[in-house]
Image (spheres, grey):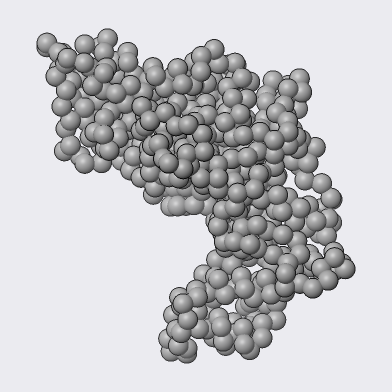
Amino acid sequence: MIPDGTSIGVYSAARWFKYYNGMGDRLHVDPYLTGTVTSFSSNAPIGDSAPTGSTYATGVLQQIGNVAIYPEASENDLYPVDASRTWQPAATILEAVKMEKNKSVGLVVTSEFAHATPADFSAHHYKRNQYKAIAPQMAYQNLDVMFGGGNRHITPDIRTHLTRTGTTLIQDNKNELLNYNGNGKVWGLFQEGALPYNIDRNPEKIPSLAEMTNKALEILSKNPNGFFLMVEGSQVDWAAHANDVATIIDEYLAFDEAVGKVMAFAEKDGNTAVVIMSDHGNSGLSIGSRECAGASKLSLEELFGAVSKIKISASGLESILIETKPEAFKTVFKQYTGIDITDEELAMLHSSKNYKESDYTQVGTSENLAHNIVKIMNARSCFGFTSGSHTGEEVLMAAYHPQGDVPRGNMRSIEINQYLQKVSGLESSLEELSDRIFVKHNEVFKGMNCSINRDNPDIPVLMVKKGRNRLEIPAFSSVAKKNGKPFDIGSVVVYIDKNETFYLPVSLADML
Ligand SMILES: [Zn+2]
């Protein structure tokens, strides 16, 4: 479980927030905290979601932007990088347990499904936002569960493949998803892109992370061989980028609810290990700030009263204010935040760059409305931020294992992957698997007639001929054709344009 971009200060703020609001003084994660994780890129100490999540998934350090792929070597490498493997896809724990242990596999997120962290476990590319390469790989992984956002990535080809593999695709229908009681694979997607922040979520239409997680556990645990599930609280990170404290806390608590569901399942199941850690810090959130003199004398009410009255994210309030007449700003702002804004603050909101009521006001500054809303909210609190970006301190680690075999102390991100490999009971390493299923096509089909068909520039197709036999192997797919007849490859094929190479199973040579 990964609460994306969650610094240690978020846990502290969420705990006091709960206490102030009469929700107890413990987080679901608290009894399971065992240490910290230092996570980083192959050539930079401050991590980013794509490389750090990829390291949890593969055990391979990677560069910013990389999704489960061996990185380029760089003069800034923190540990030696094997340049002979650059661009080779790195097999993930999800792929290994599916292929080698016949376990079910699932991903539950609140971002769009092809976003960095879920992609880290189920796709391979050097560029995280290359969705045309990533989304099809995730579909062709034949995931048993994929819940989150991202309807915009469902192409006709993906839809056809899901149907062909007996996968139920449920779109924008919460009840249908939560009432699903079949035995097949299920994709449940909401919204075109990401889900709304939990604080802005309409609970009638959009499931919570905890609801989706519970459903995923119910579906995946039907497999007697067991399962692998990755749950991401995707948007703690986004709220931290925005320095939006109320939303950071609410997003974390929504994640913590899902932790509660998972731990209840694991404790009862007695056969499930859990690890929980963020992928990197974000924004340096502190309780107490330079602007707040005498912070150590402030009461719980003074520290957590104002933030508890905020019932919307800054971006949610922005979208409402953009549609609001200037004379109604003060009332609307108070309604959602409990804040009486000053005339000066009102003028600042009206002058926001993206506030378009040009009949009434001039668009004067380079600041957008959401940023100015955050400024107003934070001026009434004593939370501090050092940054609007990722930060390099270690993140908290929590774990559960039925026999108590949990990781402890300060771990490096690679060791989290090693732990996952160990508890999954894998007999061979992920590196060995990579060398079986991600081999360069000119090695696999050495001496045979290979050409690349680029009729569809997004999905090049490798054409291989030997004697009378012909293979057609499309990129980012797990279905190829032999003499025109489709067959399942058993893993996804990755095409890297940088070296014009398809990475595919060495066993495909036996087809010819
Ligand atoms: Zn992240």
Q: Is residue 137 above or below residue 381?
A: above
The furthest residue to the left: 468
Q: How many marks on residues?
A: 0
Residue 84 x/y as whole percent: 36, 27
x 49%, y 21%: residue: 430
91 or 218: nearer the eye? 91
Q: Is residue 509 left or right of residue 198?
A: left
Q: Is residue 356 above or below residue 203?
A: below
Image-quadrant location for residue 291: bottom right
Q: Is residue 258 left or right of residue 108?
A: right
Q: Is residue 349 left or right of residue 169?
A: right
Q: Is residue 375 above or below residue 181?
A: below
x 59%, y 25%: residue: 418
Q: Quadrant of the C terminus?
A: top left
Residue 151 x/y as whole percent: 42, 47
Residue 409 x/y as whole percent: 73, 33
Residue 180 showing in the rendered view? no
Image-quadrant location for residue 272: top right
Image-quadrant location for residue 380: bottom right
Residue 449 x/y as whole percent: 14, 19
Residue 364 showing in the rendered view? yes
362 or 22: nearer the eye? 362
x 32%, y 26%: residue: 503
x 27%, y 9%: residue: 510
Q: Quadrant of the N terminus?
A: top right
185 or 312: nearer the eye? 312
